[in-house]
Image (cartoon, grey):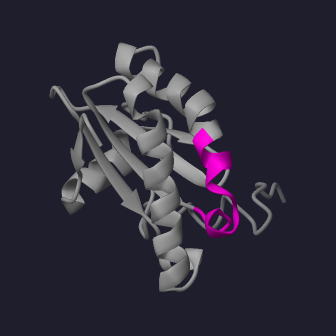
Amino acid sequence: MVFTIKLNQNKDFLRLYQRGAFCSLGSALLYAMPNGRSYNRLGITAGKKVGCAVKRNRAKRIIRAAYTANELSMPIGLDIVFVARHTLPDESSLILTKTLGTRGLKHLQGVSDGSIPCEAQNRPPRGRSAGKQKQTAAPASNATSCGTSSSD
């Protein structure tokens, strides 16, 4: 990898997951965000849902090969994270290489020139407390169980 170093800090991965622009490549997800440097930083993840260690390592090898094949045509100055999906280890590496060369490069170019925003303001909150919001209790006399008021 010519213009790329490894992204290995957990805080950088979390920053990309929360604020980076993402794109689906079919069997992998691509998160990208400008980093203000003269090189790209690449991170690859393959969770346990992908399969056993052999399948996770194969998924990471496929992603690395696809990235290396398309690296010279990619814009520089981005943090990039690939997340493998469970279907990736069973696919040919040529499929991801081709998808990254078309849809992925278009996405990365958009992130680099600013036409695809990175601050995700429309995304719903994630995590355990995402669905828990403070609810105000309504007075019992004004509301019934179906949400209408009784006028007896």
| Placement of 55 over or under 84, stated as above or below | below
Task: Identify the residue at horizontal 21%, vertical 32% (top origin).
Answer: 35
Q: Is residue 14 magenta?
A: no
User: Within the image, what quadrant is residue 150 found in?
Assistant: bottom right
| Placement of 111 over or under 78, stated as above or below | above
Task: Identify the residue at horizontal 39%, vertical 37% (top origin).
Answer: 32
Q: Nearer the viewer, residue 84 or 131?
A: 84
* Residue at the bottom extreme, as displayed: 52
**Image check: 138 left or right of 146?**
left
Task: Identify the residue at horizontal 41%, vertical 43% (top origin).
Answer: 68
| Placement of 137 over or under 101, stated as above or below | below
Q: Position of residue 99 (x, y in %)?
A: 64, 38
- Image quadrant holding the C terminus, namely bottom right
* Residue at the right extreme, as displayed: 152
One can see residue 16 in this view? yes
Q: Position of residue 41 (x, y in %)?
A: 25, 43
Main SS, magenta residues: helix
One can see residue 132 in this view? no
- Image quadrant holding the N terminus, namely top left
Q: Nearer the viewer, residue 61 or 143?
A: 61
Q: Is residue 95 magenta?
A: yes
**Image check: 125 left or right of 152?**
left
Q: Position of residue 15 (x, y in %)?
A: 28, 48
Q: Which residues are magenta?
A: 85-97
